[in-house]
């Protein structure tokens, strides 16, 4: 088997989002209504470790892969502190509205 093309199974991580991160899961479903299947593609890419696709946290759980763009990390941290966010989902640029 060629490991360079092997897909990492993220089924367990998706189940964890559904079970323990209800607001994040609602955001994923909402994003899929706005941009279609690309939302699920971005989530899976982020869950597989690809940066700049999908990153979320809720109730102490973190899913996806951090964004490498320092402005995004800074802006999200500032918004969380300023507004007391209960959950955050960050989407790839061009995924309709960007951060959600």
Image (tube, helix red, strand yellow):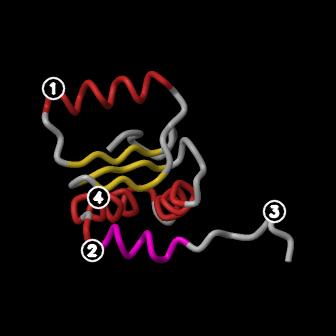
Q: Residue at x 58, y 60 (%)?
A: 48
Q: Which mark is on residue 19?
A: 2
Relative placement, left or right, of 41 versus 24 is right
Picture disc at residue 4 = 3
Residue 35 has which mark? Answer: none
Nearer the N terminus, badge 4 or badge 3? 3
Q: CA distance from mark 2 to mark 4?
A: 10 Å
Badge 1 or badge 2: first in the primary sequence = 2
**Label 1 – label 3 distance at C-alpha:** 42 Å
Q: What's the CA distance linking mark 1 and mark 2? A: 28 Å
Looking at the rendered image, the quarter that the N terminus falls into is bottom right
- Spatial CA span between label 1 and label 4: 20 Å
Q: Is residue 14 magenta?
A: yes
Q: Residues within 10 Å of mark 4 (few under 14, many from 20)?
A: many
Can you tell which mark lies on residue 24?
Answer: 4
- Specify the principal SS of the magenta part: helix
Distance from label 4 to label 3 (Cα)? 30 Å
Mark 4 vs mark 3: give the one in front.
3
Residue at 17% across / 47% down in the picture?
Answer: 86
- Per the image, label 2 sits on a secondary structure element best described as helix
Earlier sequence position, callout 1 versus callout 3: 3
Q: Secondary structure at mark 1?
A: helix
Q: Give the magenta-colored segment's residue range.
A: 10-18
Mark 3 secondary-structure assignment: loop
Q: Closer to the observer: label 2 or label 4? A: 2
Q: Position of residue 14 (x, y in %)?
A: 42, 71
Question: Which image quarter: residue 28?
Answer: bottom left
In the foreground, 40 or 76: 76
**Residue 82 - label:** 1
């Amino acid at each position: 088997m060629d490991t360079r093309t092997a897909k990492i199974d993220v089924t367990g991580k998706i189940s964890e989002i559904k079970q323990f991160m209800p607001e994040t899961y609602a955001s994923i479903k909402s994003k899929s209504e706005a941009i279609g299947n690309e939302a699920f593609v971005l989530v899976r890419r982020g869950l597989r470790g690809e940066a700049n696709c999908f990153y979320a946290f809720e109730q102490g759980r973190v899913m996806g892969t951090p964004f490498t763009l320092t402005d995004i990390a800074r802006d999200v941290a500032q918004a969380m502190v300023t507004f007391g966010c209960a959950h955050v989902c960050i989407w790839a640029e061009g995924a309709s509205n960007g951060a959600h």
